Image (cartoon, rainbow, N blue to C red):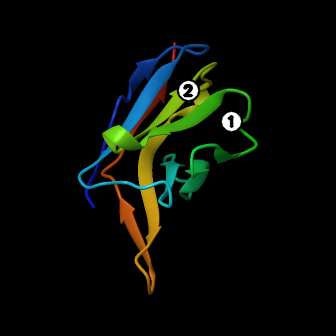
């Protein structure tokens, strides 16, 4: 599965951005969809994940500000980012994890840059 992330850009502190991750193949509810981010000089970290329709997890740093969702009919996951802070500046990557019957298959998107600055 190829993943295409989009929606990054420049936002002011307190602003919002909506990231999208479109998959090239059918995504089922069994596929775990996640967003990671990597800031300059830091390790990649998990930001949010969704399994099924409503089973969501978030990093403590984004709880209450970011919302992950998915539209399986469009094979797309979203990350709504509100109340953005300068420390949210990073390259954001979408990631999927799916079981093919014998092993987990992991796929990564190319990343989209989010810059939060006044």
Please give the name of the residue rendered at 55% of the width and 13% of the height, measured from the top-left corner: 15
Residue 7 vs 29, above or below: the answer is above
Could you tell whether 51 is left or right of 60 in the image?
Answer: left
Total marks shown come to 2
Mark 2 or 1, nearer chain start: 1
Along the viewing direction, whichever of 55 and 93 lies nearer the viewer: 55
Please give the name of the residue rendered at 47% of the width and 59% of the height, measured from the top-left corner: 31
Q: Secondary structure at mark 2?
A: strand
Please give the name of the residue rendered at 42% of the width and 32% of the height, measured from the top-left corner: 19
Q: Position of residue 90 (x, y in %)?
A: 48, 40
Q: Secondary structure at mark 1?
A: loop
Q: Which residue is mark 1?
A: 62
Q: Are marks 2 and 1 in contact (CB under 8 Å)?
A: yes
Could you tell whether 35 is left or right of 74 in the image?
Answer: right
Q: Position of residue 39 (x, y in %)?
A: 51, 46
Along the viewing direction, whichever of 101 and 38 lies nearer the viewer: 101
Examine the image and state in which quarter residue 92 appears.
Answer: top left
Q: Position of residue 53 (x, y in %)?
A: 57, 44
Q: Position of residue 12 (x, y in %)?
A: 52, 13
Along the viewing direction, whichever of 2 and 55 lies nearer the viewer: 55
Q: Quadrant of the N terminus?
A: bottom left
Q: Which residue is mark 2?
A: 81
Distance, label 2 to label 1, CA atoms, is 9 Å
């Amino acid at each position: 599965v190829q993943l295409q992330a989009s929606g990054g850009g420049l936002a002011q502190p307190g602003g919002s951005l909506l990231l999208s991750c479109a998959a090239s193949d059918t995504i089922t509810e069994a596929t775990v969809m996640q967003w990671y981010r990597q800031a300059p000089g830091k390790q990649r970290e998990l930001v949010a994940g969704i399994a099924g329709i409503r089973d969501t997890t978030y990093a403590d740093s984004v709880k209450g500000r970011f919302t992950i969702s998915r539209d399986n009919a469009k094979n797309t996951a979203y990350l709504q980012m509100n109340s953005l802070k300068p420390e949210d500046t990073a390259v954001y990557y979408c990631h999927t994890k799916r079981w093919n019957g014998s092993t987990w298959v992991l796929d990564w998107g190319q990343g989209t840059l989010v810059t939060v600055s006044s």
